Every structure is written in structure tokens, then in C-alpha cells.
Image (cartoon, rainbow, N blue to C red):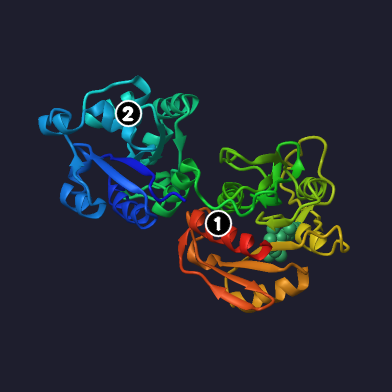
Amino acid sequence: MQAGKSVLLIIGGGVAAYKALLLIRLLKSAGIGVRTVLTKAGGQFVTPLSVGALSGEKVFTDLFDLTDEAEMGHIQLSRAADLVVVVPATADLMAKMAAGLADDLATTLLLATDKDVLIAPAMNVRMWDHAATQANLATLRVRGVSVVGPDEGDMACGEYGPGRMAEPEAIFTAIQAKLGGGPRDLAGRRIVVTSGPTHEPIDPVRYIANRSSGKQGQAVASALAARGAEVVLISGPVRLDPPPGVETRKVETAREMMAATLAALPADAVVCAAAVADYRVADAADQKLKKADGAGRSLTLVENPDILATVSALPQGERPPLVVGFAAETQDVIAYASAKRERKGCDWIVANDVSQGVFGGDENRVTVIDAGGSEDWPRMGKDAVAERLAGRIAKAMA
Ligand code: C5P
């Protein structure tokens, strides 16, 4: 469906520029035309030769290249494609976009274009967190620029945090969504997704929580919505922006998550990706607990309701036809996850091996277990896992 569409790909100057090469391949194999612009800094990381070889087209680099101007003016170049994509969008490029500077070919095109723009930011975590970058980001968002990533993870500079560019598969999915031609095989379906951690209060200022980032659940919600599903995301407290095109209901505790999930039914499917706290404090204090000098303190914990098991056990007619759970395991993944599927009564379990640094990271390696057996998926970005899971859900519901 997207074959015949075209993208103007601006490659900025960052280590992540190599991922632009993989993106070009993905776009080309989907039949999407790619015309590329390499910034001067981008040219320090990838060569016009490799970009040109992959895109199969001339690579544009210089605003004052008279041949290019004779063949195609920069105004025309900025408008010939269906979508302008900036990969990687460096802090500098974002700042220039926000300020409306036009001092080279890439920035001139970005100022001159009348097409939608999608950026994939990539930079050092401190540069990303800097108030200037965040203000530029907000400005760009208000102007309608779409943003994919950045992810949180290890960075080339040796630091850890948000700033790592989204994986090519995720950028590809975002491009497909912008071009509007992805499969809409979940149109008319209503799907509830739980995501993120829960916070279980100890007193008004303290709580018990876990390290879930909510990334995988939000990616699933986005991927389902991109396929046309009406998605209700029940999210525990996370640091992520709510995904566009999804109705997000924020909750804090497991019991609130349970109530919100049941209230969101009926649905055609429920995906429980939340890392729900198994226990809560039996009698959370109304007032802040004071330090008792020298004395220890113990908390009595009581079990939380199991949302996945509860939804799976709903009577026929109320139970969504497809209930999917997640299972984080550190050993004997398939055996434990299969047993969990049986015990909780859900249809599929997406099992991830969290012994491999999955929590909070951007990649996941999962095994999907259903009544028919298990399916091992290779290690990939959480967005790619979400996209593949959404495809599997669409197929199961067809
Ligand atoms: O038992 P465990 O926490 O490993 O099970 C994981 C699966 O069960 C996930 O899908 C999670 O969202 C779901 N779950 C739930 N309510 C709970 C505990 C887990 O929905 N209280």
C-alpha cells in the first residue's frame, strides 16, 4: 500500500547515522522511495557512497551545488516526498529547526517543506535532558513535528539514559503510520492494554514500586492503534509521554489498575503488560510515618488481586476472546511461563528472559507461548516486538 510513496531522509551527524543505512533498506524493501540528504556532520559518520548505493539515488549534500539546483531546486526537493524524516536528529539540528535557521541544505529543506516531518532524536543523555533541548522539542511538537524515540539505554559515549536513537524498525513503523498505509487489520476492535509498574503506598509520601519503565506496554498499545484498534491503555506511573492515538487512563495501585481494566471492558482482547505489584502494604498509614529511634519497623504485606487471572476467568460472554499476559522470568523461561499460562488461564504468554538486561532497556528477547506450543523470537527492539505481537493478534482475530 505504501509502495510508490517516498520519503526525504535527512541524515544528521551522530554515531546513530549508521542506523539510517538500515532504515533505507527497510524502506526500499517496502517499496518506499528514499531520497537522501546528508549533512556535513552526517558525512563524518556515513559516506555518500554507501547511502547512495543503498538508496539507489543521488545523495544531496550541498545547498550551493549548482547542478542540483539546475536539476531540482531546493524548494522542489523539500516538497517532492510524502514525508520528511530526520535520522538522527541531533541536538543541533533540533535547535536549528526550532529557531527556523537555514544555513545548509538540510535546514533549508526543513524550513521550506510543506510536508509532515518526523524526527528520531539521538544525543548524549545530558544534552537530551538540557532545558534548551526540551524546550526545542516542545516547540517542534507544538508545530506538528512527530517524534520517535529516543530510547533509554547504553550510549556510545559510555553513559546511560534517554538519548539513544530509536531502532530502525521502530522508525520504520512510525514512518508507515505517518504514510498511512500500514495494515489496518484491527479496525473496529477494542483492546485494553495494562502497562508500567504500580505504586503501593506505605504512607502519604512513600511507596513500594518496581523498575518497570512501561516501554513495552506502551509500544504494544501504539502498535495496536497503528493497525486501527481502539486502544485503552491503563498505565501505572511512568516517565513516558502517553502514546498518541491511544486513550490513556492513569492509575497508581494494583487495585486501581484492576478497577480501571474491568471498567474498560468489554473488549476484543486484553494485553496485560503491566508489572503489577504482587503485594501491597496491609494498612498504609494516613499520616507520614515517623522514624522510631533505634527501633526496627516491619511492614505487613497482603496479596494484590491478579488482573490477568481475573480477566481470564470472567464468564463466557464477558471474557475477552483473547487474553495475553507477559511473564518476566530469569530461568527455565518456557517451563515457568507455560505453567503461568495454565495457572492464570490466559491464552498467550509473552515470556521474556529478564536475566538479559531487559528491564528498563530498549530491547527484548521473547518467547510466545500459546496452546499450540512456543515460538522463539530473536532479540529485537521493544517496538519491533510490539509490532510483531500486534500482527499476531490481528491474525488471531481475523
Ligand atoms: O505472576 P507474574 O507477575 O509473573 O505474571 C505476570 C503477568 O500477570 C503479567 O501479564 C502481568 O501483567 C499479570 N499480572 C496481573 N496482576 C497481578 C500480577 C500480574 O495482571 N497482580
Residue drawn at x 35%, y 42% as measured from the top left = 7
Amino acid type at circle 1 is: Ala
Tell me if residue 92 can be seen.
Answer: no
The label on residue 110 is 2
> Does 127 appear above or below 302?
above
Query: Is residue 275 or residue 395 the one in the foreground?
Result: 395
Tell me if residue 366 can be seen.
Answer: yes
Residue drawn at x 66%, y 65% as measured from the top left = 396
Quadrant of the snapshot with the C terminus: bottom right
Tell whether 379 sits left or right of 294. Answer: left
Q: Spot the residue most to the left.
A: 66
> Does 27 appear above or below 65?
below
Task: List x then y, in percent, for residue 110.
Answer: 32, 28
> Does 79 appear above or below 238?
above
Tell whether 222 sits left or right of 346. Answer: left
Q: Which residue is mark 1?
A: 386
Among the two numbered marks 2 and 1 on one chain, the one whose residue lies closer to the N terminus: 2
